[in-house]
Amino acid sequence: MKSVETDRAPMPRGHYAQATVHQGVVYVAGQLPIDPAHPERPPGDIRSQTEQVLDNLSAILQAAGSDLGCLLQVTIYVTDLDLWGEVNAVYAARLGAHRPARAVVPVAALHRGFKVEIQATAAVRSG
């Protein structure tokens, strides 16, 4: 097992790794829309929050030897299902034709008033 850490995504503030790689699979911890260059910046609208979460996820996957095209399973936590259309539009634009297995989980609240969090599992790139 190997822990993954990159300064291109928010550093963990608790006892966990950004991701763990084991036997060719990358397990990414839930990512919030925190800009690692400006961690205290307040959250923007749901589209910008979703973009930032996907940027964070992509950076961690790259550090682990993977990318968004290798996603196997994604869990998206959203605080308001009325926002789902916008989240899904940003997600679909970023992933293109790739369609990993996915679950959407409504939650009452997320840290610091964020509206979206994404946790994922991906394969390590082959070759």
Image (tube, rainbow, N blue to C red):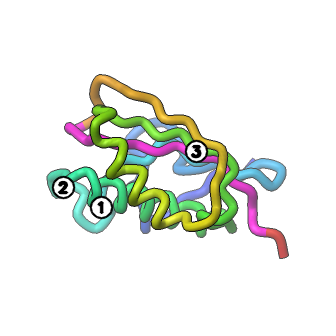
| Whether residue 104 is situated above or below residue 58 in the rendered picture | above
Please state which of the two labelled residues, at mark 1 or mark 3, is closer to the viewer: 3
Residue stretch in magenta: 112-125
Query: SS for tag 3?
Result: strand
**Residue shown at 65% from the left, 51% from the top:** 100
- In the displayed structure, does residue 78 sit left or right of residue 92? left
Q: Which residue is mark 2?
A: 44
Q: Which residue is mark 3?
A: 74
- In the displayed structure, does residue 43 sit left or right of residue 81? left
- In the displayed structure, does residue 72 sit left or right of residue 89? right
**Residue shown at 36% from the left, 61% from the top:** 51
Task: Tell me the tag on residue 35.
Answer: 1
Task: Return the x and y of residue 125 as percentages of the image width and height.
Answer: 75, 68
Task: Return the x and y of residue 39 as percentages of the image width and height.
Answer: 25, 57
Q: Amino acid at mark 2?
A: Gly
| First-in-chain label (1 vs 3) | 1
Task: Return the x and y of residue 54 as percentages of the image width and height.
Answer: 44, 59
| Whether residue 102 is situated above or below residue 8 in the rendered picture | above
Q: Amino acid at mark 1?
A: Asp
Q: CA distance from mark 1 to mark 2?
A: 11 Å
